[in-house]
């Protein structure tokens, strides 16, 4: 972040993306999700981009519903651990999962 700011990027415009997928193993991706709260110390929004094939190189051979449920679980856990922005493919279904989780937590 300091490097970006030194190049003229305003700190308030920075979003932290730990990069789920992108050459990481399943274990590394799960560790990132588990430890997202540690990134909150940076004081910037955290973005998690869950793609159906990011958590496991084997997800692409599963049925769509299995990918969707895995993505929903990963998104919910990411939000609970500090993510404030999520990027997904099936927005309608994931939005419903987030709303239900939010309702449960608020009641």
Image (cartoon, rainbow, N blue to C red):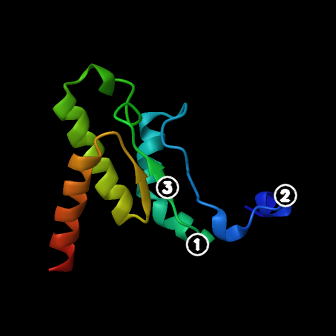
- Residue at 39%, 64% (x, y): give it: 81
Which quadrant holds residue 52?
A: top left
Horizontal side of 102 relative to 9 (left or right) equals left
Residues at badges 1 and 3 in contact (C-beta under 8 Å)?
Answer: no
x then y, percent, for residue 71: 29, 43
Marking on residue 7: 2
Structural crowding at the residue carrying mark 1, measured as other residues with C-alpha within 10 Å and reported as few (<14), some (14–19) or many (≥20): few
- Secondary element at image label 2: loop
Where is mark 3, residue-wise?
A: 47
- Above or below, 63 against 51 in this view is above
Where is mark 1, residue-wise?
A: 41
User: Given the current orientation, which residue lies at the most extreme bottom position?
Assistant: 107
Q: CA distance from mark 1 to mark 3?
A: 14 Å
Horizontal side of 31 relative to 92 (left or right) equals right
Q: CA distance from mark 1 to mark 2?
A: 22 Å
N-term-proximal mark, 1 vs 3: 1
N-term-proximal mark, 2 vs 3: 2
Structural crowding at the residue carrying mark 2, measured as other residues with C-alpha within 10 Å and reported as few (<14), some (14–19) or many (≥20): few
Residues at badges 2 and 3 in contact (C-beta under 8 Å)?
Answer: no
């Amino acid at each position: 972040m300091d490097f970006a700011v030194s190049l003229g990027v305003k700190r308030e415009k920075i979003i932290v993306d730990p990069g789920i997928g992108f050459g990481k193993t399943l274990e590394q991706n799960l560790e990132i999700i588990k430890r997202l709260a540690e990134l909150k110390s940076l004081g910037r929004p955290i973005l998690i981009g869950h793609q159906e094939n990011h958590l496991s190189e084997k997800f692409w051979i599963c049925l769509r519903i299995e990918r969707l449920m895995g993505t929903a679980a990963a998104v919910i856990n990411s939000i609970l651990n500090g993510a404030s922005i999520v990027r997904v493919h099936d927005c309608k279904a994931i939005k419903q999962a987030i709303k239900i989780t939010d309702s449960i937590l608020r009641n």
